Amino acid sequence: MQKVSELKYERLSMEEFAQEIKEVIHQVKTADSARAVLAARDRCNQLMIRWETAQALSYMRYSINTADAFYLAEKEYYDEVGPQAQNYLLEYTRAMLETPFRQELEESGQIIPLVFRSFEVELKAMSPEIVQDMIEENRLVSQYSQLMAGMEFPFRGENLPRPMLMKYAKSPDRATRKEAYEVLGKTLKAHSDQLDGIFDQLVHVRDRMAKKMGYQNFVELGYYRMGRLCYGPEEVKQFRENVRRDVVPVVARLRKEIGKKLGVDTLMLYDYDLIFPQGDPAPKGGKEAIFAAAKRMYHDMSRETGEFIDFMLATEAFDVDARKNKWGGGYCTSFMAYHQPFILANFNGTAGDVDVVTHEAGHAFADYTTANNRYVVELGVGGMETAETHSMSMEFFAWPYMAQFFGEDAGRYEFMHLLDALSFLPYGTIVDDFQRQVYENPDWTPAERKAAWRQLEAEFRPHITFDGIPYLEEGTRWQYQMHIYETPFYYIDYCLAQTAALQFLLASRKDYDDAFHRYVRFLSQGGEKVFTELLQEAGLRSPFQEGALQTVAQESEALLNELERALSQETK
């Protein structure tokens, strides 16, 4: 068993990739039987495993140190040749869709129809005409990620990366929280020309790609690029309305009560990260204690999760220490050729550190479980909304074990976690609708974009204010939400997944074993069924139905009240 640090990286050159994929395409086009098409498909899948593994390994090693010259060069190589590879794969996709053996392959069950549906979406997401634009887009995204990774925030005599600065946003001392956000705003303002400039270029290059492909704007192309197979802009519009009507009032009511307990008349942005006046619960130990507790938890949860965490720890598949030049977010990826998930995060001593070994580990468990699925190369673990359901639900299935991480503060963690989860829905909806408006109006000025963000905050989070916070009061909170720059239209997937995860939580409070069984079934099928089908099979309601969130919001509020009563009894 190799450790992640020992996995061999070897560049797969564009020349080698091109030669192989051209032969595969020819094999599909000249196939004289369904069996011959399957042989070509298998060959393509093996090529894709090599390609995706090389790309993922190089990106991982770049992200743990964005100043590493070798892996920076490798990332830039894939950024440049990646669109060319996609163009070749487009030819393969078209050949597979046009093969006269498609019906036979589908009816015989040798390739499920969903694979061909995903191919059809891929054709709508890519064109040879936009290859150079995609290269430019990759360059701009890298420019943004390097800017954010290298940005330092001067705070009380130290220069901190943003994840470490945000630790102080949860301080029980209001002056400290305010100071942290002021430093955040002032530092971002010092880079405002770059932040505005990079985003403006990204908007225009994406708009240009969409129009070259015959779309009115990037919104439609953006949805196809996300590979969505069971919903589109109209369904998401209904979801946003469900959030506005049924979740926003509940969150506003709950957050105002929190403000009273914090002793503040006006809930400021810098008050929003804190739930309890005495300070929010934090893990009782450092990194080693967290991983020891995670190992105990997953062994108790099920045999499969026990085997999974042992594998992750034995292969040292976590990098969680915050440091300069490390990418500032968190993610889970997988190196397909090795069947090896990997998790990157930035521990900062807050409850978010525990979320890494629940949320990101939920992703990794899905990768681990589905590694040998028949369609994993083409369909992965599912759409991003499905993948995020894996991770967000695991956070809630970890609740019975929170005392191992937080000791006597486990109940306070559960209250905070649920309130944050419910509160996230309005924020995530802001992110999504902001992107819709921006790409429908690509010629907006930076000031117009910021005004749109302020208006959405007023609509979906009317209970908080940004007034007086340098730069952020201008409507710039979105500039350090990396998804907006890097992966447009991804963020709504978190919201959709959160609604499913909340339903799993509520079900687990009634029958944990049954809910967990349904969750593992949901997860183990990977992408072989679409999100709405998986929800139905798991007994969960689709978030796209009108009024779908009313019960979720009401029952979550009732559970929060129950948790709060239990906390009150503990303090008596």
Image (cartoon, rainbow, N blue to C red):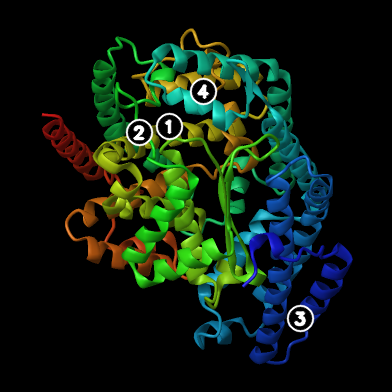
Quadrant of res 557: top left
The residue lying at 27 percent from left, 23 percent from top is 258
**Foreground tag (3 vs 1):** 1
In the rendered image of this protein, does residue 261 appear above or below residue 239? above
Q: Tell me: 127 left or right of 424.
A: right
Look at mark 2 in the image and give the residue it sits on. Answer: 423
| Distance of label 3 from label 1 (alpha carbons) | 48 Å
Q: Which residue is mark 4?
A: 453
SS of the residue at dot 4?
helix
Q: Viewer-nearest of labels 2 and 4?
A: 2
Residue type, numbered disc 1: Tyr
**Position of 32 relative to 126 (above/below):** below
Q: Kindly identify the amino acid type of the residue bearing the numbered disc 3.
A: Lys
Decide which of 93, 134 is in the foreground and name it. 134
Residue behind mark 1: 427
The residue wearing badge 3 is 29
Query: Is residue 416 placed above or below 344 in the rendered structure?
Result: above
Question: How far is the residue under mark 1 from the one under mark 2?
Answer: 7 Å
Q: Residue at x 57, y 85 (%)?
A: 105
Q: Is residue 190 left or right of residue 533?
A: right
User: Residue reaching furthest top?
Assistant: 468
2 or 3: mark nearer the eye: 2
Residue at the spot 37% in from the left edge and 50% down from the top edge:
395
* Residue 339 visible in this rendered orientation of the protein: yes
Q: Amino acid at mark 2?
A: Ser
